[in-house]
Image: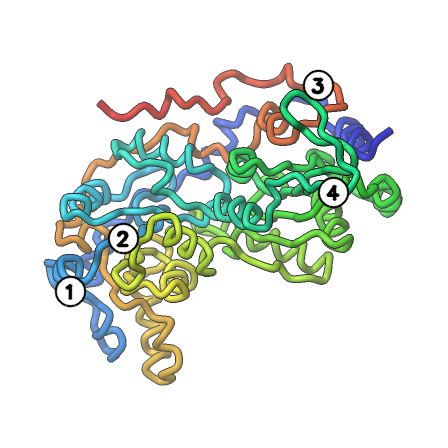
Amino acid sequence: MSARARTASLARASRPRTRAPRRRARFDAHRRAPTPRGRADAVRTMAADSNNLQRVLVTSRDGLTRELDDDVDAVVLDCDGVVWNGDRLIPGARAAIEALRAKKKRVFFATNNSTKSRAHYAAKFASLGMEVSKYEIYTSAYAAAMYLKQRRFDEIEEGDDAEPRGEHGERGGDARQKKVYVIGERGVMEEMEEAGIDVEAGVYDSVRCTGRDWEEMEEWLDPEDDVGAVVVGSDSAFTFAKLAYASLQIQRGALFIATNPDAGDKIGRALYPGAGAIVNAVATACGEQPEIYCGKPSSFMLDLLCEHTNIDMSRTLVVGDRIDTDIAFGKAGKAGLTALVFTGVTDSEQLREKCLLADADESLADALPDRAIGSLAELVGLTFNPDEVCDSVSDVDTDVNIDEDDMLRAFPVSDAPLPEWSQYDDDDDQFDQTQYAPAS
Ligand SMILES: [Mg+2]
């Protein structure tokens, strides 16, 4: 039995036989609270008792209008906490994006969220009444796929004795494509698929991996099934078996690629584990650090955007709601201007604390945003109205799990029969592009 068939067999044996609770009810808890009232006004009235805070805090009703008119050609916006909070649009965000485009600014979106593809995000924008092309969206999942493409994971490696075979010119002999093992969700899978990168099935829905399983797994793995890279991102179905398999492949020489280092996202009152928690688990297990974080705060995603679009970074404004990722990302990519908004995870008090520390230690001032303002609306000189009734997408978008059909599509296990539990799929739980039709 081939290694692939053995791992698929292990996976099938561990599948639960009971029907899972319906997702809609399970994930209601993930819905986020609407944008807090008056947060932006609180920024205006807060006491600017720090030199650095006085320097960065924008209190003018015109926002950054002067900078936008004189110094900026392109704007790169973070999504969660800037444009929307979870599934709900932030007041004034859509009007602000329209205003930026009316000023002939090129607008791009950059998010560390790897659970959804650019196509999925474009559909989400459409459902919120905004026309955004997937080519204007950069995610850490897409960045990871592009990084692997740069490392030629989309190409067939040909050995000396490789012979052409098949009508489409597929090659035989020892010709093979380097595979990638993914700990992640459909966003990463879809971007890998689109980039022509072959994803290894691994132990995709096994949960346990005992010491004996580990020994067997090591025996099963042969050079033909060699995985050239392990991509680790956010995965709400992360298991010990996935951890063990990823660790084994990295110890066998696979590249260790991380989508992003975020510890978590604030959902409700507490942090929901993010990709960083899983990346650190893998790093601890294999004793190696990722060779790259493709998402923020690394500049890779911004460099990629720059390469694709030819924007002048010195005339680019990067806007985000996190200092340690969004602002650091803009600074790493040498953006001309960075701006922090308070509609996401960072509040004005947190900025004030960082400013006070920077007052005492000048070396910390570089990490501060160039500007800080209540919201994206205020950044373009519009009024932020916390009572504005904002659109929200259907709960399809809060789907953080992977359907079995997606797994099969993402992990084509050619020599294994279809799993029996595909009969349990609920039609209404499938991702349906038509639900994201633009608002009329
Ligand atoms: Mg954010």
Q: Quadrant of residue 345?
A: bottom left
Q: Quadrant of residue 39?
A: bottom left
Q: Which residue is mark 3?
A: 418
Task: Give the side of residue 241 with respect to residue 186, left or right.
Answer: right
The residue closer to the viewer here, 371 or 31, is 371
Where is residue 152 shown, x and y percent of the image?
A: 60, 46
Secondary structure beneath label 2:
strand
Instruction: Please say if 189 is above or below 361.
Output: above
Where is residue 433 shown, x and y percent of the image?
A: 41, 23
Instruction: Please say if 295 is above or below 412.
Output: below
Where is residue 350 shown, x and y percent of the image?
A: 35, 66
Q: Earlier in the sequence, mark 4 or mark 1?
A: 1
Mark 2 vs mark 4: in front = 2
Q: Which residue is mark 1?
A: 59
The residue closer to the viewer here, 282 or 118, is 118
For label 3, the crowd category at 10 Å Cα-Cα, with few meaning under 14, some 14 to 19 and many 20 or more, is: few
Mark 1 vs mark 2: in front = 2
Q: Which residue is mark 4?
A: 241
Secondary structure beneath label 4:
helix
For label 2, the crowd category at 10 Å Cα-Cα, with few meaning under 14, some 14 to 19 and many 20 or more, is: many
Q: For the C terminus, give its image quadrant.
A: top left
Secondary structure beneath label 1:
loop
Secondary structure beneath label 3:
loop
Q: Earlier in the sequence, mark 1 or mark 2?
A: 1
Q: Is residue 138 visible?
A: yes
Mark 2 vs mark 3: in front = 2
